[in-house]
């Protein structure tokens, strides 16, 4: 009987861990987003068609989930944004896949006051 309790406990913990890992990135109102601005030093593809950005002096990777499926191109982004100051807005959330908060999901990307990408809903 004790073994079955341990199995149930482990199964429950496994389900909870899966729910934490597989939960979607929250889409929050723009007023609740964190904001970062900086000069773009690198733009690359990461994950599955994700458009990824690195900013000068910032070790964080910022990404637009499946951005290359949503009309953005690496060439277009590089041509217009490399070496330029951009502003990104992103939700604050935690996942066990990124315990050190070194990867951020971009909810809104702005350049020179113009919105280049947004998934925010007002």
Image (tube, helix red, strand yellow):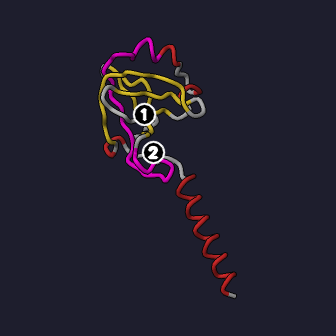
Q: Which residue: 41% across, 41% down? A: 102
Image quarter of residue 84: top left
* Label placed on residue 62: 1
Image quarter of residue 2: bottom right
In the rendered image, residue 31, in percent from the top left (x then y), is placed at: 31, 43
> Measured along the vertical axis of the image, is residue 102 above or below residue 43?
below
In the rendered image, residue 61, in percent from the top left (x then y), is placed at: 42, 34
> Measured along the vertical axis of the image, is residue 89 above or below residue 12?
above
In the rendered image, residue 45, in percent from the top left (x then y), is placed at: 54, 26
Q: Secondary structure at mark 2?
A: loop
* In the displayed structure image, the side of residue 42 where residue 66 appears, left or right: right
Q: Dot 2, crowdedness within 10 Å: few (<14), some or many (≥20)?
A: some
Q: Which residue is mark 2?
A: 27
In the rendered image, residue 88, in percent from the top left (x then y), is placed at: 36, 32
Q: Which residue: 53% across, 48% down? A: 24
Nearer to the camera, 81 or 1: 1
Do tag 2 and tag 1 residues touch (Cβ < 8 Å)? Answer: no
The magenta stretch spans which residues? 77-101
Residue 89 among magenta residues: yes
* Structural distance between the alpha carbons of marks 2 and 1: 16 Å
* In the displayed structure image, the side of residue 70 where residue 31 appears, left or right: left
Residue 118 among magenta residues: no
Marked residue nearer the N-terminal end (2 or 1): 2
Image quarter of residue 85: top left
Q: Secondary structure at mark 1?
A: strand
* Label placed on residue 112: none
């Amino acid at each position: 009987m004790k073994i079955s309790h341990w199995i149930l406990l482990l199964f429950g913990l496994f389900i909870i861990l899966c729910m934490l890992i597989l939960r979607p990135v929250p889409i929050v109102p723009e007023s609740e987003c964190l904001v970062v601005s900086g000069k773009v030093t690198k733009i690359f593809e990461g994950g599955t068609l994700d458009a990824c950005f690195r900013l000068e002096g910032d070790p964080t990777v910022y990404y637009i989930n499946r951005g290359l499926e949503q009309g953005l191109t690496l060439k277009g982004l590089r041509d217009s944004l490399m070496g330029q100051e951009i502003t990104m807005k992103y939700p604050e959330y935690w996942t066990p896949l990124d315990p050190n908060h070194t990867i951020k999901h971009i909810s809104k990307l702005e350049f020179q006051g113009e919105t280049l990408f947004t998934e925010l809903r007002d």
